[in-house]
Amino acid sequence: MSETRTALVISAHAADFVWRAGGAIALHASRGYEVTIVCLSYGERGESAKLWKQDGMTLDRVKAARKAEAENAAAALGVGDIRFFDLGDYPLELDRDAKFRLVDVIREVQPAFMMSHSHYDPYNTDHMYTTQVALECRMIAQAWGHNPGEKVLGAPQLYLFEPHQTEQMGWKPDVFLDISPVWDRKKAAIECMEGQEHLWRYYTNAAENRGNHFRRNSGGMAGGRKATHAEGFQRVFPITVDELT
């Protein structure tokens, strides 16, 4: 029997994984991958304006609402393993113990691939900080001297998912993933994020635009493969191949 394939998504806030990688998550979950999502914060301070505008709102209530939204979205994507570190946002900060906690998750999951944010995001430094931490924890998880006796990590690719304004972030996609078969799941997950309803249409448009890019890059006018929706990613590490295609 083949080994279960796994994937790990590291999200700064409780909604980020939905907008930026919901299609990839749903697609791989549908193909038998065990996907683990780690939300470092709920996005309770910086990304919950709609909730804070309600009378009598409290920090605990905002966190509870965001947690419920994220759990519902993960379920819509076919994922049952979503973990909340509750480290606070704006700013998001991880001390040594929190980083080692994330290393523990990485070693536990042994992901075939990992996903996180763009390298640079001047509009939301929590995002680029999360990727810095993801890279650091990936490195630690590969170290034989960290908790000797545990299974060390191999070399999973880290895919950087699409930021909100790509032209400001220096993010250049080198992978387009067809998510047409699971678009309905991503749409359902998007609609779970009621605290940020203003983004629903934006990320629907983004998926449609990337579907166009998938068609063009898979053959273009010569007969590109049909894709109604796609997601773009930027790889951090080189790929190893036996043949160029």
Image (cartoon, rainbow, N blue to C red):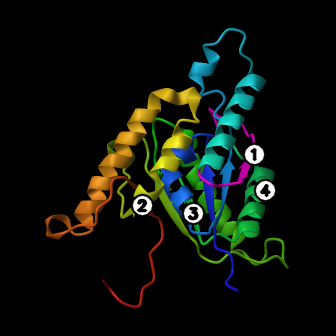
Check residue 49 for magenta coloring. Answer: no
Inter-mark Cα distance, 3 to 1 = 26 Å
Q: Nearer the viewer, residue 175 or 135?
A: 175
* 222 horizontally vs 159: left or right: left
Where does residue 171 sit, x and y in percent of width and height? 38, 52
Tell me the residue at 72%/10% (across/down). Answer: 56
Query: What SS does tag 3 mark?
Result: helix
Are there few (<14), some (14-19), or many (20+) residues within 10 Å of tag 1?
some
Q: Is residue 117 visible?
A: no
Tell us which disc is closer to us: 1 or 4.
1
Q: Earlier in the sequence, mark 3 or mark 2?
A: 3
Q: Earlier in the sequence, mark 2 or mark 4?
A: 4
Disc 2 residue type?
A: Gln
Q: Are marks 3 and 4 in contact (CB under 8 Å)?
A: no
Q: Are marks 1 and 2 in contact (CB under 8 Å)?
A: no
Disc 4 residue type?
A: Arg
User: Which residue is tagged 4?
Assistant: 101
Q: Are marks 1 and 4 in contact (CB under 8 Å)?
A: yes
Tell us which disc is closer to us: 3 or 1.
3
